[in-house]
Amino acid sequence: MSPSPQRSSYDIAVVGGGHNGLTAAAYLARAGLSVLVLERSERVGGAAISAQAFPDFPTRLSRYSYLVSLLPDVITRDLELDIALARRRTASYSPYQRDGVSGGLLVERDEGERTRASFAELTGGDTEYDAWRAFYAGVSDLARAVSPTLTAPLPSERELREVVDAETWRDVVERPLGEAIERRFSDDLVRGVVGTDALIGTFASLHDPSLVQNRCFLYHLIGNGTGEWRVPIGGMGAVTGALEQAARRAGTEIRTGAEVTAVETGAADDGAVVRWRDGGDGREHAVEAGTVLANVAPWVLHGLLGRDPAEVAKPEGSQLKINLLLSRLPRLCSGADPAEAFAGTLHLAETYGQVEAAYAAAAGGRLPDPLPGEVYCHSLTDPSILGDVPEGTHTLTYFGLHTPASLFTTDPEATKAEAVRRALAALDEQLLDPIDEVVLRTADGTPCIEAKTPADIEADLAMPGGHIFHGDLEWPWTPARAAPETPAEQWGVQTDLVSVLMCGSGARRGGAVSGLGGHNAAQAVLERR
């Protein structure tokens, strides 16, 4: 049971205690404002938490969100966060079987001769690797141009277009990404490796005219100007733990087990009343707030404001997350060192043709087979998450593509079981040691395998449709001819109400574990005071 709030009114009420809500709270409390954070769960952190997923084993997994790429260093410095983000020594490894021969495309974290040789072994020469380097050189220039703007008022599209190579801008911003991939690359596997960054949590063809896949691609490659995906030491919970400490140190009041039921604004739109229900005894509470920051999906906020849910389309997530605990890393058919292959992103059934075929199947209401996905072994980079376990134990995380929520509506459990089977089959196809032989089991013989579909994400985290970005990502700049006037518009956090701002993944520069929604909402509040 949460005690009653310390005050009857606050300068700021934050709905949702995920990492963005904590970021906003820390900034605003440090500026001297009274801040109340309300979180429906019994702990803060939202999707960015660590948890013991399997009885009998103390290992703490990053249960939902699992890597950090977008969190700007400036937020870490501003809030004096005690967190460490480690580099993975391998960028990616993509096992393959061609003409009866097993191999693997290795991309080193710092690309060198081994990467070039790996491309040559796959493609028969240097042409494809030269195309790879040319493409990513342009993408890197775009990332370096966009990254510094993420913690500033929104730049205009024109500002950025003028400082980026015209071909790169066209390929990433103006035309479906699939066109550039097909024009620049010849090998089906190389094409697929490039394209998968556009499909993380995003259900789309690489030729989708909406360009939602292009926006996803951009967000995955612009963090701190490099887009490098890093492992948080201690798990994702260490990130939100540090943010919670920063918010509390600054004087933020945090209430967990507090499910917000309504946000009420008057005709004057000069403040709001926030109502919530205590998760322990069901008591109703209410406070007044000068500004409400919504660290929930826009679809959820729409309902909290008392508006008709049918007026806004509910988001639909598209991913399958599987957490595993293994007695040892399995050997690969290619003969690659498992400690190197699993240290980065290991691609499975993700050739260009397989990815596009999987989208077509899912769009037609069928579970893809094979199921494209990728695997990560965080314990190779951060063994501290393992705890007291037998020597050789490792975590494994699988993230599957093109599994929209709609596939799981008719028979959720049976479809989930089949999706897990197909995901592990795609992995087993590349292994000498099947997963069933190396997965740990609890005392009752249950395999240490935990799967989360979009429906599970919605049930666990109240993310509508299980959409990990709260909805489709937007370009991190103002469109041509737009003229933002208010601080909220300039920072990309506005709603149609002056007293209510977005501060989570639903903000214009939301999505992923970045703190951007929280940082930018806080700056908008401070600028208009």
Image (cartoon, rainbow, N blue to C red):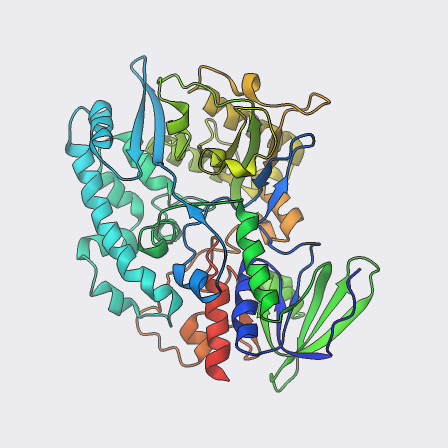
Left or right of 403: which side holds 147? left
Task: Give the tally of numbered discs.
Answer: 0
Specify the quadrant of the image occupied by residue 53. top right
- Look at the picture and state if 509 lies above or below 191: below
Left or right of 496: which side holds 99? left
- Look at the picture and state if 387 lies above or below 77: above
Left or right of 102: which side holds 451? right
Residue in the foreground of this view, choosing between 492 and 46: 46
Specify the quadrant of the image occupied by residue 71. bottom left
- The N terminus is located in which quarter? bottom right
Residue at x-position 79% and y-position 66%: 3
Residue in the foreground of this view, choosing between 417 and 338: 338
Specify the quadrant of the image occupied by residue 196. top left
Q: Is residue 296 visible?
A: no
- Look at the picture and state if 135 lies above or below 174: above
**Residue with the most extreme top position:** 100
Question: How far from the left and from the top, in percent, is residue 481?
Answer: 31, 74
Residue at x-position 34% and y-position 68%: 479
Question: How far from the left and from the top, in percent, is residue 180?
Answer: 24, 45
Left or right of 53: which side holds 213? left
Question: How far from the left and from the top, in percent, is residue 7?
Answer: 73, 77
**Residue with the most extreme bottom position:** 268
Residue in the foreground of this view, choosing between 394 and 503: 394
Residue in the foreground of this view, choosing between 529 and 90: 90
